[in-house]
Image (spheres, grey):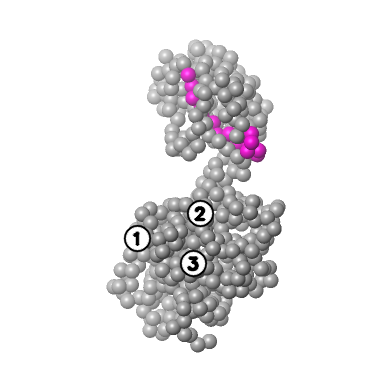
Amino acid sequence: MERNDDLPLDRRLRQEILLARERVYHFASPTPLEPLGLPGLDVWVKREDLSPIKAYKWRGACNRMAQLSADERARGVVTASAGNHAQGVALAAAKLGIAARIHMPRSTPRVKQDAVKKLGGEQVRVVLAGDSYDEAVGSAREDERVSGAVYVHAYDDLQVMAGQGTLADEVILSGKGPFDTAYLQIGGGGMAAGVAEWLRTYWPGIEIVGVEGTGQASMKAALEAGMPVELGQVDIFCDGTAVRKAGTLPFEICRQRLDRMVTVSNGEVIRAIRTLWENLRCVAEPSGAMGLAAALQEKESLAGKRVLVVLCGANLDFLKLGQLAASEASSALASRTMAVNIPERPGTMLRLLNEAFSGLNISDFQYGKTDGSEAWPVFTVQAEDATAIDALPDRLQAAGLEWQALDGAEDIRFRAIPLRADLLDHPLFLRLDFYERAGALHDFLARHLDPTANLCYFNYRQSGERIGRALIGIDFPNREARETFARQLPPQGEGYRLCQPLDPAATARLTGGRMGR
């Protein structure tokens, strides 16, 4: 097919997607399109996580580099990437025998750095530069200027956009359509532009929704301004889409083809990652789940519609996977964090658990004694039924309890639990390992807490394991009561498998060396 560079950009892009068909499959095979299987929602997932680089970026990089002239190949290529585009360039460099230098932010997940080196072998050198994608771009552009290498842009390039468009070509040819709505995540906009152009060509009535993170919405800002504009700050939780300024070429296509924009929070993305795991047993990186996050946000309006989302990447550091799983947002349960005011005297904490939180799951419990007359323990409570959480303030008010909402509080998030050692008489600190089930903490306290003793410290966070672990401080009125309790408390018992006092050194650190007044 003969190219015509005088054509409008959208027609040139369609032409280049057709030409890309012949090139990209020399490097990899098409990826599956699978139903998500959510009750009441007809959502289909394009599984780009099953590509050779676990992301869609191989398409654009391979299409661009396959068209380099002999002179350009001899000069080599340079690029900047937060990870997935880098792997696409590495794959193409190894197969085409082209030397490539890839500039990546120092904060790039180790799994992406290692994958680039593995895919590229001797053809690729990774250069860690700067703390953000934009700083890595600056370093790569300087490399381009000095070395004369060809810069392969991650998204602001017609050939790259066309390569990404082959993703949509596979959707069209799958026979699973037509789709009513497609949710396309956006970083620089290359994938959204290529996919939107192709979907609109074959299904003119499809609604195409652009999706960005709330703290990185560069395309939304560009559409509002009528031109790409630079964001002052970018949230990098969804690192694969953390782009400060939308691409010029993608912007021109997106403003023609996108019907509207949606932004999603990091919490919504985490819940979408969990949904993908529970239904497809796949683990998406945060950017890879953004499209589904938007669909779940709007699920009430999607009844009876066939919906397309793209799982665009699954290059996730193992350590980050643990952080996501442990985060409060990963739970499918409704939750609320609050501090409750109770008198500082024996038995009041147990009564609070009995009266106010009965039937609710306590997923986080933080408390340290800081006052001689009143206490403000902090709880995060969860329930399957959101109405039970919504009714909690009324339940506390009916019990005559004052409370404060602490959702999102930084000191709670970082577990800054104060404790005044000068208010303690004869404290005993215990490590408690108990079986995670409703009421387990309450049952332990009800069975074993000495009626003359008082809780002075509690540090517990639900981890998702079958065993919960808590650090508990109990203050006794005298040394004899403390020693009797420690001697008689079984190290194992009903509902728990381990309860042991902390060693004296650990207790001294918690109390600043004060073992009792």
In the displayed structure image, the side of residue 499 where residue 134 appears, left or right: left
Amino acid at circle 2: Thr
Q: Residue 375 colored magenta?
A: yes
Hey, which quadrant is residue 364 in on the image? top right
Q: Residue at horizontal 60%, vertical 53%?
A: 298
Question: Mark 3 to mark 1: distance in Å?
Answer: 25 Å
Q: Which one is in front, 496 or 53?
A: 53
Residue 254 circle label: 3
Mark toward the viewer: 1 or 2: 2
- Circle on res. 135: 1
Residue 490 magenta: no
Pointer 1 or 2: first along the chain: 1
For disc 2, the marked residue is: 263
Relative height, residue 35 to residue 437 (above, below): below
* Residue at point 49%, 57% (across, down): 212
> How far apart are labels 2 and 3 at the CA level?
15 Å
Q: Residues within 10 Å of mark 1 (few under 14, many from 20)?
A: some
| Whole-percent x, y for residue 473 in the image | 51, 24
The magenta span reads: 374-389
Q: Amino acid at mark 1?
A: Glu
| Residue 79 horizontal/vertical position (percent) | 40, 69
Q: Are marks 1 and 2 in contact (CB under 8 Å)?
A: no
Label 2: few (<14), some (14–19) or many (≥20) C-alpha neighbours in 10 Å = many
